[in-house]
Image (cartoon, rainbow, N blue to C red):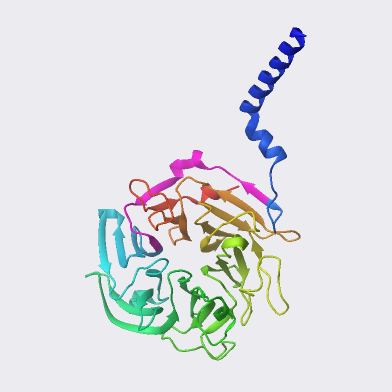
Amino acid sequence: MKKAIYLLIGFIVISSLIFIFFREKLVATFFFTPRKNFENTKLIDHNKEIKDIEVLLTDLSIPWEILYLADDDYLITERSGNLVRYTKSNDATVRIPIEGVKQSGEGGLLGAALHPNFSSNHYIYLYVTSKGEDTDINRVERHIFDLETNTLSEKRVILDSIPGAIYHDGGRITFGPDGNLYITTGDATYEDTAQDKDSLSGKILRIKDDGSIPADNPFGNEVYSYGHRNPQGLAWDSKGQLFSSEHGPSGAQTGHDEVNMIEKGGNYGWPDSVGDTVLPNTIAPYIHSGSDDTWAAGGLDYTNGSFFFAGLRAERIYKLTPQADTMPELTEFLGGTYGRLRTIKLLPDGYFYILTSNTDGRGNPKAEDDQVLKVHPRVFED
């Protein structure tokens, strides 16, 4: 009897030790939940290639967008309301306050874009949240940026009265291959407005560089596509096809973050179409995260056959590579290394630039947050 008890105790001890040493593998084997909506998923840890990642700039206040002026010369927007010019060659940082910015929740100074002819006209475009008469509004402003004096002049509001709120303000602006300015707007927490083609909220908008409406816009106004919740990224592939990254719902339906292939006049279904639930006459996501994962997708860019987008809640970079006969391949990089990631952008010098977003009230900021990271492209090689 005693021998049996000793054997049982020994078995329990040995089993416990085996579980302690191999628990990660056992959990991964027996309790792993497959991702939804895509089959080809890889997680690559490139922390070992930290030598290929340079911390370019630190101590920023919720950086949102980065623009390239010239070699070692950059502009960064801070959601708190500053346009930051950083010149690496002399380590000079200049903050230019933008008048009228109201930083509240997800609003503030968000996207920025340089005119395609910036070298001659010096036009810079800013997406700004401001206080309206009854509620917050978002608008797009055009300024002339003086490179010698670091001053803005000749402000012109080229698109006004975009609904704003503490959440879901969209904010990405970029010039497309057609020379028009594309703008993402959130539903400003009023979900049904995303389906209203006369409202500017929950949309991707398209305007000319002076704010006028292109003749071939689908509804005779600024709206290019609708039924969006909170799109945060815009990028074109090598064929000139527009894609957007978008935040999915929270609460009981959390997850279902999306990358969408954007069609002119297309309805992307929010608030009724979510994930694989796609109603008639709406367009299904190109890919979505499913209900078990949340990307909180930020900025989006494209190069060499792949899209790259930043994950805020996911705290990683995603590489999305279309496949000819199967679901796109999704590869994850830098998971949990730098915290919340807002923007990834390939600049003309051939490097990726990543903006962290740890000081936005949802992260865990460390010393020197927030940061701009300069990343060699080989970090994202499979």
- Residue depicted at x 71% and y 38%: 29
225 in relation to 88, above or below: below
The tally of labels here is 0
Most extreme residue toward the left, as rendered? 149
Task: Name the spot of residue 203 as percent of width and height, x first.
Answer: 54, 78
- Residue depicted at x 68% and y 70%: 284
110 in relation to 92, above or below: below
Between residues 2 and 321, which one lies in front from this camera angle? 2
Task: Name the spot of residue 316 as percent of width and height, x first.
Answer: 52, 51
Q: In the displayed structure, does residue 318 sit left or right of residue 362?
A: right
Q: Magenta span covers which residues? A: 41-64
- Residue depicted at x 40% and y 57%: 361
24 in relation to 349, above or below: above
**Residue 289: quarter of image:** bottom right
Between residues 170 and 67, which one lies in front from this camera angle? 170
Image quadrant where one finds the N terminus: top right
Task: Name the spot of residue 175 as percent of width and height, x first.
Answer: 47, 75
Residue 126 in view here: no
- Residue depicted at x 56% and y 78%: 194
Most extreme residue toward the front, as rendered? 1
**Residue 290: quarter of image:** bottom right
Q: In the displayed structure, does residue 349 sit left or right of residue 21?
A: left
Residue 216 in view here: yes
Task: Name the spot of residue 104 as percent of width and height, x first.
Answer: 37, 68
105 in relation to 199, above or below: above
Q: Is residue 150 magenta?
A: no
